[in-house]
Image: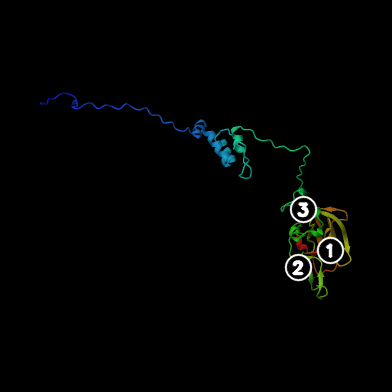
Amino acid sequence: MTSQNVRGRRRASGPAVELRPARATMEIRPRDTERQVRRRKSPLRQVADFAAASGVGQKAGVALAATGLALTVGLPATSPVMATSESGQTEAALAVTGGSQPEVSAAASAKIDFSRAAVATAADPDGKLKQLLSAQSAGSIQRASSVGTMASPLDTLTTASPFGYRISPLTGGSGDFHRGQDFVAQCGTAVHAAATGKVTFAGWHEYGGGNRVVVDHGNGLETTYNHLSSFTVKVGQTVNRGDTVALSGTTGASTGCHLHFEVQVNGEVVDPMGWL
């Protein structure tokens, strides 16, 4: 057999290889519904949804407003937990997407009281004291509930002689029962009402109190202010917590300028520190 040169590609000497027919394949991928939603949402809408869902609606609203974009964002409540609708959307998200929100209404007969006395919290001792006295007699109130319900009768409290038995500063004898708390006060120091009440006595106390003022706070609770150099209130007058009712002194059975302060419950003296 002879070989010869031919131009172009060399022809195959064997039989032609049969080509397999191309197979048309199509894989049906599951439809990503979330992806389609993301494609349809604009970047602005995605930011708004994220802000509402993450509870930073207020900050996002400020940031977007600074760029000149208008955005309605439902502000979250003080708690990070927000109410959820039946469809699973939070109230803030409904506000962004234009969904309806439930209406909050009150009956026409509902009473809304924002008076100071109606708020009985630790930050409002006047309201707390009023609530205690309206709920029960002063004699049944426990110390844990009464402490802090009265204000200081002086701008600065420094105890000179505590409540209870002591050695008498007048006679030097033991077994003297001290009916109140003596607080250090130079003569002429302003004396304040420890709580709101009505003045039931303002005058000379013949049993050693000197110039004395008594304020009735209701339901068996009274406070007295003794050894005063003078007083500025009269019987029947209503005074508020912190009002100046007198000036301290050393009248009556006293050895020097100070304030003798008493708390009486149903006519019996108790330790004032259980109320201050």
Asked if residue 227 can be seen in this view, the reply is no
Can you give x and y, in whole percent of width and height, for residue 145 in the image?
75, 58
**Residue at 82% over, 61% down:** 264
Q: Give the residue type that dot 3 points to.
A: Asp
Q: Nearer the viewer, mark 3 or mark 1?
A: 1
Can you give x and y, in whole percent of width and height, for residue 218 in the image?
83, 55
Drawn side of residue 87 relative to residue 272, left or right: left
The residue that mark 1 highlights is 268
Dot 3 and dot 2 residues touching (CB under 8 Å):
no
**Residue at 57% over, 40% down:** 53
Q: Give the residue type that dot 2 points to.
A: Ala
Mark 3: which secondary structure? helix
Q: Give the residue type that dot 1 points to.
A: Glu
Give whichever of 18, 187 is nearer the camera. 18
**Mark 2 Cα shell of 10 Å, populated few (<14), some (14-19), many (≥20):** few
Image quarter of the N terminus: top left
Mark 2: which secondary structure? strand
**Residue at 82% over, 70% down:** 177
The residue that mark 3 highlights is 126
Image quarter of the C terminus: bottom right
The residue that mark 2 highlights is 160
The correct choice, above or below, for 165 with respect to 193 in the image is below
Can you give x and y, in whole percent of width and height, for residue 253 in the image?
84, 69
**Mark 3 Cα shell of 10 Å, populated few (<14), some (14-19), many (≥20):** many
